[in-house]
């Protein structure tokens, strides 16, 4: 059974259709990368999966269960999210950002939460920064805390919403390295990103979204080398040029 | 009158009555404390309701706030004193004030302050980036948990400057309790210079209590500045 399945998902804001009849499925361990021009509905798609946004029609299944039938907090415990603008809790240290969910949602003791938080900080290379506040960290460090925060909840699926788009070019590498490690370890990831290098090397499947619809979907080498749509070719071509 | 000797005598008169002014100061500080506390207890939930509430509760809270902010404080205090069925509660020993006047003044100043404090908190809560709430919800926190653990701790820090303002306003406005005869600093000051033959001391008495009001507001504001620094988020803008 697929870990995540979208079936005929529609979403509009007022008269504007943002997603139209979007459907795909991914298995445990898959790394799905979604690309598309701005306004194509990529972020909305991610937000529908953990129900930060509710869909209008269609269905989304997590491990066979319709996400609407689940308690939204229970759903979000199983689906982590990493944001473009990091969204670290500004008043809490790097460690405190991670422990909040552990103590309040998973009911871990303070000591357990602390040690688990430190483990995950070490895993993203930030053991030394546990006591730093977000404003004292670089963007790349903040985003790695954001990843550790999501990861520490032990989710079945991780959503990445343009995790490197707000970073200075020299800081992107560290974040991508962490994401590559996760992919290698078998984490199931649904990523919206413009990082073509990452898409090419780490993605198991690449989806090109345009105008709220899936234009083309397949293994990354297929979309890069011999796309069946002109729109895919021109979009990926532009992005790849930009990335050079 | 107006001679140097007479003025020196007026300062001596003020000095001789330091106890009266001290008691007045104590009452002023007490009234400020009770009013600000009531204002916080009413204003914090009211500001929260104005942001997160819905339906008639929010309507009622919003309307009450508009009415309280739109009425002069002297009118409010007289209205509460004569309009509310406050029983005769006797006299508070030591500072010798009538309790019913103190209660009326606390209600008027406190609820009015609550109406303003609600706006301080509402603004502070609304200034917290939406992403903070989304991140908290994405970890699986309920909206109640997210508000409590993520939004409030940041909003309270941001409301310190507005609260300082409010503190200064309430402290100075306690003087309007004069209108219902509560023996706070201004009322007691007046009682001094209204004594037979002491009208020469008006300036001296008023200057001294002005200084007392100033010292109180200045000292407290500095203390709140200091607290703001201690609790500021490291590296953050506050």
Image (tube, coloured by chain):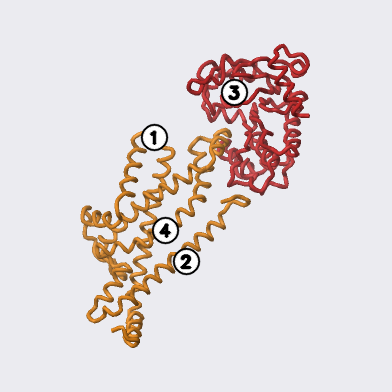
Frontmost residue, B14 versus B54: B14
Which label sits on residue B167?
4
- When asked about the image quadrant of residue A194, the answer is top right
**Quick one: SS at disc 3?**
loop
Q: Chain of mark 1?
A: B
Label 2, label 3: how far apart the Cα atoms are: 55 Å
- Residue designated by label 1: B54
Asked if residue A95 lies left or right of residue B228, the reply is right
Residue reaching furthest to the front:
B2
Label 4, label 2: how far apart the Cα atoms are: 12 Å
Q: Residue at x 74, y 28 (%)?
A: A242
In the depicted structure, whether residue B63 falls above or below residue B101 = above
In the depicted structure, whether residue B80 falls above or below residue B51 = below
In the depicted structure, whether residue A229 falls above or below residue A124 = above
Label 4, label 1: how far apart the Cα atoms are: 29 Å
Asked if residue A240 lies left or right of residue B186, the reply is right
Q: x, y (%) of residue A135?
A: 64, 47
Q: Residues within 10 Å of mark 4 (few under 14, many from 20)?
A: many
Q: Residues within 10 Å of mark 2 (few under 14, many from 20)?
A: few
In the depicted structure, whether residue A180 falls above or below residue B211 = above
Q: Residue at x 51, y 35 (%)?
A: B142
Frontmost residue, A164 versus A76: A164
Q: Looking at the image, is mark 3 or mark 4 nearer the viewer?
A: 3
The chain displayed orange equals B
């Amino acid at each position: 059974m697929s870990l995540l399945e979208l079936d005929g998902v529609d979403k509009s804001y007022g008269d504007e259709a943002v997603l139209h009849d979007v459907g795909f499925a991914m298995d445990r361990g898959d790394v799905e990368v979604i690309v598309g021009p701005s306004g194509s509905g990529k972020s909305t798609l991610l937000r529908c999966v953990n129900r930060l946004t509710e869909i209008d029609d269609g269905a989304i299944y997590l491990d066979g269960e319709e996400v609407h039938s689940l308690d939204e907090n229970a759903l979000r415990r199983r689906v982590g999210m990493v944001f473009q603008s990091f969204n670290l809790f500004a008043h809490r240290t790097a460690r405190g950002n991670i422990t909040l969910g552990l103590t309040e949602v998973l009911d871990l003791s303070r000591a357990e939460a602390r040690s688990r938080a430190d483990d995950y900080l070490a895993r993203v290379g930030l053991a030394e920064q546990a006591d730093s506040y977000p404003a004292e960290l670089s963007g790349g460090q903040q985003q790695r805390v954001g990843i550790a925060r999501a990861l520490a909840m032990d989710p079945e699926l991780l959503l990445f919403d343009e995790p490197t788009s707000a970073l200075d070019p020299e800081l992107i590498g560290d974040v991508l390295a962490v994401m590559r490690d996760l992919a290698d370890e078998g984490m199931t990831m649904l990523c919206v990103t413009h990082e073509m290098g990452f898409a090419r090397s780490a993605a198991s499947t690449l989806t090109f979204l345009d105008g709220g619809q899936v234009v083309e979907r397949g293994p990354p080498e297929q979309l890069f080398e011999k796309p069946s749509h002109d729109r895919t070719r021109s979009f990926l071509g532009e992005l790849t040029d930009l990335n050079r | 009158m107006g001679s140097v000797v007479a003025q020196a005598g007026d300062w001596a008169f003020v000095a001789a009555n330091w106890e009266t002014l001290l008691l007045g100061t104590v009452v002023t500080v007490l009234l400020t404390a009770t009013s600000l506390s009531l204002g916080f207890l009413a204003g914090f939930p009211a500001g929260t309701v104005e942001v997160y509430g819905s339906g008639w509760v929010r309507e009622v809270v919003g309307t009450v706030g508009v009415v309280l902010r739109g009425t002069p404080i002297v009118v409010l205090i007289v209205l509460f004193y004569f309009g509310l069925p406050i029983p005769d509660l006797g006299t508070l020993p030591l500072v010798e004030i009538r309790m019913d006047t103190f209660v009326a003044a606390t209600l008027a100043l406190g609820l009015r302050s609550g109406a303003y404090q609600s706006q301080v908190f509402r603004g502070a809560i609304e200034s917290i980036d939406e992403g903070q709430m989304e991140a908290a919800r994405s970890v699986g926190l309920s909206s109640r948990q997210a508000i409590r653990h993520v939004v409030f701790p940041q909003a309270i820090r941001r409301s310190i400057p507005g609260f300082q303002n409010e503190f200064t306003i309430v402290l100075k406005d306690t003087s309007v309790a004069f209108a219902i005869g509560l023996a706070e600093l201004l009322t007691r000051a007046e009682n001094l210079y209204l004594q037979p033959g002491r009208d020469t001391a008006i300036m001296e008495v008023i200057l001294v209590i002005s200084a007392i009001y100033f010292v109180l507001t200045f000292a407290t504001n500095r203390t709140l500045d200091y607290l703001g620094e201690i609790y500021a988020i490291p590296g953050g803008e506050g």
